[in-house]
Image: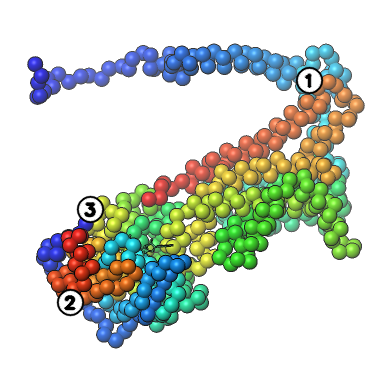
């Protein structure tokens, strides 16, 4: 008979969960073998790993040559990656043609940069404003004086001799630091109510976005000197930095514009109604939110900018990739895997920096999350 | 949530007639004002004079131009014809004057529009610090004073996203008050709120009215209107169709549109 009333007479004590959901077995079940389809995928995946991992391990570590005086050891049949070659040319990869005796100057720049950028990126570190001034305004001047020399009793080292990772970092960092403010201004300009400013910004953005970076770099190295007044030569490295910066600024402008558009109109109106003028409402209310929204897009642009620095090798600048590439003609280390090893090394260096940026942006996104807007 | 007129009459315990309305000082004056959105004539020949200390409620059907009207008063919307004079400053294209007017006019929105990246306290101190140049410590003191007035000082260090709708709206009111405005504009401050939260916001507004704040309120809360307002203005099709003291307005609406509207919401 169907009963409508019920009173529990005995309370149920807690029981252990079914064995198939806990422990190693439970984990395996839920993650690898939950359905026939997943089981199949697991098997295929394991087979793929079995196929790819051992040869990769043998090439990178097992049969690799870590220590050697020249390429003889790397030429042996069955030898893997020739890491000894990388190690031997490391100095060139980092400093390019920078004079050996003067490399301490580069090292000071590296150390100083690290000492300034770590506290800047670490949210809990104090004196953010002083730190930012030092990093964005003072540091570039110090780097220029130190690396270029020609004053304070330092010997002159032309930028043509700079190279390797040093140049990659200089172009990458200068590009990132200069393109963000420019991109923000362009994004604001594109949304301006003044038609002239708006048109100029749209024209700039659309022009630079429509041209491949290689073309930009070629034009910068061929055309800029044509337009420059007689006797004025713009440094080749500087030209590359300007080209990369303007190019990336156009992309950043579009990323930032997306963030500006995503903000509800009420935020603009609330800022206006409180009497904040345009710069203050942008700087205090709109941009902090818009930039937070666009962190993924901005970092995406930074990462592609950093990798695009390798294109400067085609206008004859010895960045990291170019030093690696030109080392391949080093006959002393000639061996079947010399080139592969070099490119693997270059790829690994780029990967470390780009992965670092990506993780840092995710960290910041989580930190800046203050819950949802209603 | 329209409250019955009779019930609203009972609500009328706080004697608002005590609150002084200046007979000489004009807070807001609108003369022959027209506004168009493109070809659409949204506000037509608006004439309105609000004295200092006066409390005006604007009612009317959806799309009648209520929001547009009060947004013209702090120039969130531009008018194309006629004059708007706020605290003796006429609104023109001059950005300086617009900022001058906005400094003295607070606005509370239907959707609160708090700044989600700032704490409650920072929301309240931002404009005083950056617009009025008040030192941080003093701005925080003022902010805490007003947060206490809207009865949420304990939320000062939370972010807006962590507060209920009613709490957010009270913070929005406090944020405006921190600028020490001479006029407060409210655009349907309670219509995005759940019924239990409406009361806490209305109570805050009533106490503000009792202190003599000049208020222009767009609302469908007829209980609030009859309790607090000196005048109710009824708008339809971009025009002021009728205005009167609340008692008269609710008891003897004269224009057929007003009657129709009141019969629908009560
Ligand atoms: N930016 C705009 N562009 C064009 N038309 C608009 C714009 N904003 C509002 N309108 C129109 O103007 C009229 C008045 O709008 P308004 O928001 O002032 O009405 P309201 O009385 O506040 O209505 P509600 O009670 O729904 O808030 C409406 O018909 C609306 O469609
Ligand atoms: Mg409205």
Asked if badges 2 and 1 are on one and the same chain, I answer: no
Instruction: Report in which chain the residue with disc 2 lies.
Output: B
From the viewer's perspective, is B207 left or right of A37? left
| Residue located at (79% from left, 13% from top) | A78
Report the Cα–Cα distance between label 2 and label 1. Answer: 95 Å
* Residue denoted by label 2: B17
Is label 2 or label 1 in front?
2
Image coordinates for residue A271, horizontal then vertical, percent: 45, 63
From the viewer's perspective, is A45 left or right of A245? left
| Residue located at (66% from left, 62% from top) | A200
Asked if badges 1 and 3 are on one and the same chain, I answer: no
Image coordinates for residue A363, horizontal then vertical, percent: 53, 41
From the viewer's perspective, is B232 left or right of A238? left
Report the Cα–Cα distance between label 1 and label 3. Answer: 76 Å
| Residue located at (63% from left, 45% from top) | A301
Front residue of A104 and B166: B166
Return the mark for residue B117: none
Tag 2: Cα neighbours inside 10 Å, few (<14), some, or many (≥20)? Answer: few
Return the mark for residue B195: 3
* Residue denoted by label 1: A65
Is label 1 or label 3 in front?
3
> Disc 3 on helix, strand or loop?
helix
């Amino acid at each position: 008979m169907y009963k409508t009333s019920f009173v529990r007479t005995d309370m149920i004590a807690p029981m252990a969960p079914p064995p198939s959901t806990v422990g190693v077995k439970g984990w395996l079940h839920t993650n690898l073998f939950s359905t026939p389809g997943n089981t199949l995928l697991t098997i295929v995946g394991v087979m793929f790993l079995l196929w790819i991992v051992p040869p990769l391990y043998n090439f990178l570590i097992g049969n690799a040559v870590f220590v050697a005086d020249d390429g003889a050891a790397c030429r042996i049949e069955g030898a893997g990656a020739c890491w000894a070659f990388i190690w031997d040319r490391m100095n060139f990869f980092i400093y390019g043609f920078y004079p050996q005796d003067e490399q301490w100057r580069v090292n000071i720049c590296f150390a100083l940069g690290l000492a300034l950028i770590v506290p800047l990126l670490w949210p809990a570190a104090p004196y953010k404003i002083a730190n930012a001034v030092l990093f964005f305004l003072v540091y570039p001047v110090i780097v220029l004086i130190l690396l270029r020399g020609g004053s304070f009793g330092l010997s002159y080292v032309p930028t043509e001799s700079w190279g390797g990772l040093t140049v990659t970092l200089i172009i990458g960092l200068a590009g990132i630091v200069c393109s963000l403010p420019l991109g923000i201004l362009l994004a604001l300009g594109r949304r301006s109510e003044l038609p002239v400013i708006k048109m100029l910004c749209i024209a700039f953005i659309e022009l630079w976005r429509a041209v491949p970076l290689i073309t930009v770099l070629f034009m910068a190295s061929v055309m800029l000197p044509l337009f420059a007044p007689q006797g004025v030569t713009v440094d080749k490295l500087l030209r590359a930095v300007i080209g990369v910066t303007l190019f990336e600024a156009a992309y950043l402008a579009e990323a930032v514009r997306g963030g500006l558009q995503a903000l509800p109109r009420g935020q603009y109106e609330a800022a206006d109604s409180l009497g904040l003028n345009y710069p203050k409402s942008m700087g205090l209310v709109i941009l902090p939110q818009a930039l937070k929204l666009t962190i993924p897009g901005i970092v995406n642009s930074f990462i592609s900018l950093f990798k695009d620095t390798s294109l400067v090798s085609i206008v004859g600048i010895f960045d990291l990739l170019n030093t690696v590439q030109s080392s391949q003609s080093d006959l002393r280390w000639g061996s079947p895997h010399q080139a592969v090893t070099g490119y693997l090394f270059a790829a690994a260096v780029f990967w470390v920096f780009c992965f670092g940026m990506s993780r840092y942006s995710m960290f910041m996104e989580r930190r800046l999350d203050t819950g949802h807007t209603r | 949530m329209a409250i019955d007129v009779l019930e609203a009459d009972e609500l009328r315990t706080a004697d608002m007639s005590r609150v002084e309305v200046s007979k000489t000082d004009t807070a807001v004056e609108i003369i022959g004002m027209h506004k168009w959105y493109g070809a659409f004539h949204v506000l037509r020949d608006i004439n309105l004079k609000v004295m200092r200390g006066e409390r005006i409620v604007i009612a009317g059907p959806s799309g009648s131009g209520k929001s547009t009207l009060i947004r013209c008063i702090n120039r969130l919307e531009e008018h194309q014809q006629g004059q708007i004079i706020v605290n003796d400053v006429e609104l023109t294209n001059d950005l300086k004057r617009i900022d001058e007017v906005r400094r003295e006019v607070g606005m509370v929105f239907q959707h609160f529009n708090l700044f989600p990246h700032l704490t409650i306290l920072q929301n309240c101190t931002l404009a005083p610090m950056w617009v009025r140049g008040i030192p941080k410590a003093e701005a925080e003191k003022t902010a805490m004073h007003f947060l206490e007035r809207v009865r949420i000082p304990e939320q000062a260090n939370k972010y807006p996203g962590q507060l209920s709708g009613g709490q957010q709206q009270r913070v929005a009111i406090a944020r405006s008050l921190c600028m020490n405005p001479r006029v407060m504009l409210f655009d349907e401050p309670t219509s995005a709120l759940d019924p239990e939260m409406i009361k806490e916001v209305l109570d805050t507004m009533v106490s503000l009215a009792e202190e003599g704040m000049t208020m222009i309120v767009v609302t469908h809360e007829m209980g609030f209107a009859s309790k607090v307002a000196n005048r109710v203005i009824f708008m339809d099709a971009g025009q002021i169709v009728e205005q009167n003291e609340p008692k008269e307005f609710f008891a003897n609406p004269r224009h057929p549109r007003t009657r129709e509207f009141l019969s629908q919401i009560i």
